[in-house]
Image: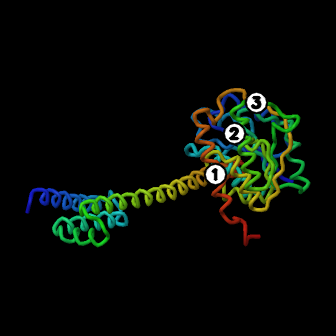
Amino acid sequence: MDLTKIASLGLSVGIFCFVVWLVRERRLREKYALLWLCTSVFVILLTVSRHILEVAALAIGIYYPPSLLFLVGVLFLLLVAIGHSVTLSRLSEGNHNLAQEVALLRKQVEDLKEEQKAHKL
Amino acid sequence: MRILAIIPAFNEARNITAVIEDLKSFRGDILVVNDGSTDDTAAIAKSLGAEVVSHPFNLGIGGTVQTGLRYAYEHGYDMAIQFDGDGQHRGDQIFKIVELVQKGEADLVIGSRTLPGGYKMGITRFIGSRIFHCLIRCLAGKAIHDPTSGFRCYGKQTIRLFSRFYTDDYPEVESIITAARNGLRVVEVPVLMRGRLSGHSSITRRKSAYYMLKVTLAMVVDAMRGRDLVGES
């Protein structure tokens, strides 16, 4: 095993453990963790056997195998970013509706309180 | 017919008294939607006898107007008027925008400055308005000369539609498309307006490029959507 291999293996295992730790600490939801765990497993596999990468790269016509790694990495990050934008839009929509609902309900509560006060007097 | 005047207000403590005073002759209820103001806007409005709804934080003009429309919808109002909290709109012009909705001849009436009898706007705003004017004509088949005007009257159908679908930022132009595409009758009438009393427009020169792009994108996407009201009674 050469040094690069050990370093990248260490890094991927490190990320894997970090993600597990984040979930354990309830800082990351399982739903999102799954994606990251799969990625690190994928990277670990590629590191352990460079052969897989070479076969895959040649199969789709890429002659320098590591660039397949970059391609997959960039595409993956792109998808994650779009996914996050969608989640963000959904969250801000919910936030927006909640704020309006809170405002309208607070008004209703205040009106009811005043009505009650008037009845008591 | 029950009418609600919706006043969106964000830190308008200096103007809100004059605005509510201006609405003295208005026969309807007044609702101030306080968009997370950090000054006394809400307290002042309440002390003047207006109904007040307060957002827990700032939502922007679209969300604020929508809160008012949701209130109007939930309380069964027949008409809602949008009346800016910065003093640009004049209470004595309300009858002009209300008339057609009252008669049942329009669902959304826009009080316009550029029609004969209106007032002159700045050059940047004029160019922007022209571009929107053309876009609206292409996408909705309507000629609206002052699409960014926030002086409006909403009929019952429109209240229902907008209480569900309304944009957060820069909603004026987009809402015209939404309404027209849902088969609502959008009409423009000339009104008189004042210059603003105090404070600044939400659209600065720096933001106007973003404004144009965002609204254009929203309008085109909106035109690609189906009708939101289909299948409802």
- Disc 3 to disc 2, C-alpha distance: 30 Å
Q: Secondary structure at mark 3?
A: helix
Q: Which residue is mark 3?
A: B18
Q: Establish if A59 lies above or below B164.
A: below
Instruction: Tell me what residue is drawn at x 51 percent, y 59 percent.
Output: A90
Q: Which residue is more in the foreground, A74 or B207?
A: A74
Q: Nearer the viewer, residue B62 or B37?
A: B62
On residue B167, the disc is: 1
Badge 2 marks a residue whose secondary structure is: helix
Q: CA distance from mark 1 to mark 2?
A: 19 Å
Density class for disc 3 (Cα within 10 Å; few <14, some 14-19, many ≥20) is: some
Q: Are marks 3 and 1 on the same chain?
A: yes
Instruction: Specify few, some or many for label 1: CA neighbours under 10 Å numbering under 14, 14-19, or 20 or more.
Output: many
Q: Position of residue B114 (x, y in %)?
A: 81, 37
Point out residue B151 in the picture as x, y percentages from the top left corner.
77, 42
| Quadrant that contains the N terminus of chain A | bottom left
Q: Is residue B77 left or right of residue B206?
A: right
Q: Which mark is residue A20?
A: none
Judging by the rendered image, the residue that carries numbered circle 2 is: B128
Q: Amino acid at mark 2?
A: Gly
Left or right: where A44 falls relative to B15: left
> Is residue B29 in view?
no
Q: Amino acid at mark 3?
A: Ala
